Amino acid sequence: METQLSRISINGITEIKDLDGNLDGKCIRVRGFALKVSCTGKYVFIVLRDNGCTIQCMCEKPIGGKGSLTPQEFNLLKKVTHESFIEVKGKVVKQEKEISGCDKKDIEIHILGFDILSAADKNLPFVMKDASATAEEREKNPTLQNVGYHIRLDNRAMDLRTPQARATFRIIDGVMFFFRGYLRRNGFVEIKTPKLIGSSSEGGANLFSVDYFKRKAFMAQSPQLYKQMAIIGGLKRVCEIGHVYRAEESNINRYLSEFVGLDMEMEISTDYNDMIAFIHSMFVSIFDSLKEEYQRRTGNNQGLPSI
């Protein structure tokens, strides 16, 4: 018989985001990064983070041979460094008092065993709490340090663990997903156009050149020509999500020589107002879908910031 625990476990590992009070008393295995490690009296508390969701894990110091861990294991647990990736085996225990600082506020995990899968260095390039802080949080707490972009980019893998970086990728993913979905519902065919071309496919843009089997080829700066060919070929409505390359120097920090373009092309039934109305409806649909998805994932009724 399939149980809730078996449904949410992957190869014996349970996702933190899927844990709730219904699993009270169940023994599970979770993996995540050690966001916070603290010792209070005879207890060790570890806040474990996985896929943006956090839960508190705790263990009591073994006394007189009684305890879930040996004294050596307990001492090792106390020394777990921040951002180490660990696996915890433990029991889900429902809490009457709300746990602050964690996404899972009504349950915690009582540690029965653990493995340090990847230990982090003690001297990290920045503190995750500093890198994750918002402008409002820094204003309220002056002790929080600002982490510059050069430090973040030099340590990009670690920076991707922050909520802000994760949110950026989620929104980009959402925009592409809802863009594609809206167009497919309206009869568009998604095509993939060449990115290595023999000559310019759009005037006015400089091209990156590459060696192509003793010939010169160029990185495509637009799918425009191919979209128009598809329309002339009778496909009526086409779209593409693909990379664009433009060898144009610029002092504007928002300009990119490589970016992902969301392109569409369609026959005009009456006049260009049809296209304007369609694009307007598409953007409204994308923003509404992003707002709905954001609320569903976070439980935040405020949705996305107003645009």
Image (tube, rainbow, N blue to C red):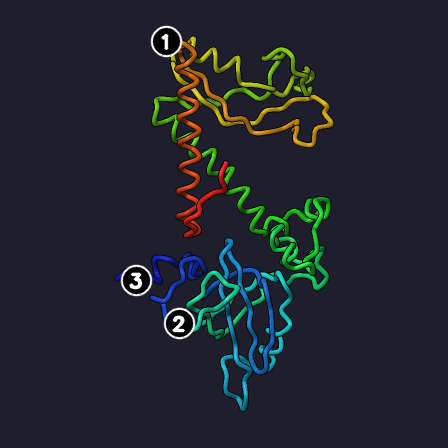
For the point 53% across and 45% down, the residue is: 167
User: Marks 1 and 2, Cα distance to the nearest angstrom?
Assistant: 63 Å
Along the line of sight, which residue is nearer the eye, 123 or 95? Answer: 95
Task: Tell me if mark 2 has few (under 14), some (14-19) or many (20+) residues whose alpha carbon lies within 10 angstroms of its own.
Answer: some
Q: Are marks 3 and 1 in contact (CB under 8 Å)?
A: no
Task: Tell me if mark 1 has few (under 14), some (14-19) or many (20+) residues whose alpha carbon lies within 10 angstroms of its own.
Answer: few
SS for callout 2: strand
Instruction: Give x and y (percent) for residue 98.
Output: 45, 69
* Residue type, label 1: Thr
User: Marks 2 and 3, Cα distance to the nearest angstrom?
Assistant: 19 Å
- Numbered disc in front, either 2 or 3: 2
- Residue, disc 1: 270
* Residue at the extreme bottom: 64
User: Marks 3 and 1, Cα distance to the nearest angstrom?
Assistant: 57 Å
* Residue type, label 2: Lys
- Residue, disc 2: 94
- Numbered disc in front, either 1 or 2: 1
Left or right of 149 in this view: 2: left
Quadrant of the image occupied by residue 251: top right
Along the line of sight, which residue is nearer the eye, 4 or 166? Answer: 166
SS for callout 3: loop
Quadrant of the image occupied by residue 243: top right
For the point 63% across and 52% down, the residue is: 158
Left or right of 30 in this view: 41: right
Instruction: Give x and y (percent) for residue 177.
Output: 44, 35
* Residue at the extreme left: 1
- Residue, disc 3: 3
SS for callout 1: loop
